[in-house]
Amino acid sequence: MGTCDTHLFLSLMQIFIPCLLCIVAKVGALNVTISGFYVFGDSTVDPGNNNYIKTPFKSNFPPYGLDFSNQVPTGRFTNGKLATDYIVSYTGLKKELLPPYLDPSLTNIEELMTGVSFASAGSGFDPLTPTITNVIPIEKQLEYFRECKKRMEDVVGKQRIEDHVKKAAYFISAGTNDFVLNYFSLPLRRKSYTLQAYQNFLIQRITDFIQNLLAEGARKIVIAGIPPMGCLPLMITMNSPNALFQRHCIDKYSSIARDYNLLLQHQLHKMQLHLNSSASNVKIYYVDIYKPIADMIQSRKRFGFEEVDSGCCGSGLIEASILCNKISDVCDDPSKYVFWDSIHPTQKAYHNIFLASISTIDFIINN
């Protein structure tokens, strides 16, 4: 094969592979063995629970939701769908969007059984983190799951719900706020914990949460890592020597995310080995979101992005939640941006994170 032929082949493959992944994603998973999909965590997986609590950390107003049908802001901290919306649509559970549990209109028992999100934007594993913006602690999210179980049991019976809970999948995504809003920004935890000690503290909190989820009957649990924190536009703005003209990832913070993700994977592996030794049928999975986001930033053109260090909303440097509002300027094409605001990815970026995780999702669903 000549040099020109090789370049042509590589170019065709770059076009063909993403298209193939999109086709696979649209077809959906086959031989579905999960009964429902339940989600815990922060703004990366909150479809609007914060709409129903007293907190300043909301996004149920324009321009959030710009790319939803009728441009309706749902409380998702992005211009459209979250990765968990794409996942639940892909699973074959017959729902296109994952609803927030606290939505008072959510009275259909089938909606509860196929899946909901208990997540709250601004939350974290450290109990101090949700107090910063007065959002739902992750332990309270678990209480809501218990309440959800009781609501389902009252309608279809305890035995059926016990079986249902065992066959469902559980997704947890949090941790970024513990560092960005808490450890890096406030002095309290830094006075009590070295960085390594704080990471270990968070890992222990995750371990406790998983154990509590197992006690409720969960058997398939997925834990997401955290992103390259030094690449968040807000982190660049706060830590760059020249926030306007030197907008590149701050590796000091991204390396902390890498170390944390390794610690998390090690702990999950250790837990799985212990569960295997007790002949348990529990499976705990790790999902990497660091690499998909880093790849989009480092190889922007391959993914069709133009802006990777600022958000689409406002200046893109500091805006999030109430600072990104109806009087904010919005970029012409959010699909050219990795980030919607100064913290949260765009719908297109979330879709790419979903596509990068399809092999893991398939394994979880079909085993």
Image (cartoon, grey):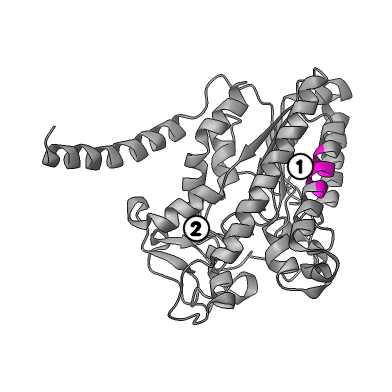
Q: Per the image, is 55 magenta?
A: no
Magenta-highlighted stretch: main secondary structure?
A: helix
Query: Residue 164's x, y, as percent?
Result: 76, 25
Q: Position of residue 163 (x, y in %)?
A: 79, 21
Q: Are marks 2 and 1 in contact (CB under 8 Å)?
A: no
Label tally: 2
Q: Nearer the viewer, residue 238 or 111?
A: 238
Is residue 243 positioned above or below 62 on the image?
A: below
* Pair 2/1: label in front: 2
Residue topped by disc 1: 107
- Is residue 249 found left or right of 215 in the rendered image? left
Answer left or right for 188 relative to 58.
right
Q: What SS does tag 1 mark?
A: loop
Q: Position of residue 94 (x, y in %)?
A: 59, 32
Q: Nearer the viewer, residue 176 or 23?
A: 176
Q: Is residue 128 above or below residue 102?
A: below
Q: Quadrant of residue 161?
A: top right
Q: Which residue is mark 2?
A: 346
Q: Residue at x 66, y 26 (%)?
A: 34
Report the span colored magenta.
204-210
**Residue type, label 2:** Thr
Q: Is residue 243 left or right of residue 8?
A: right
Closest to the observer: 321 or 113?
321
For the point 44% across and 34% down, the residue is 26
- Can you see residue 174? yes
Which residue occupies 62% across, 28% down? 364
| Secondary structure category for the residue under label 2 | loop
Crowd class of label 1 (few under 14; some 14 to 19; many from 20; radius 10 Å): few
Residue type at mark 1: give it: Thr
Relative vertical location of residue 327 with respect to residue 174 in this rendering, above or below: below
The picture quadrant where one finds residue 361 is: top right
Name the quarter where the C terminus is drawn.
top right
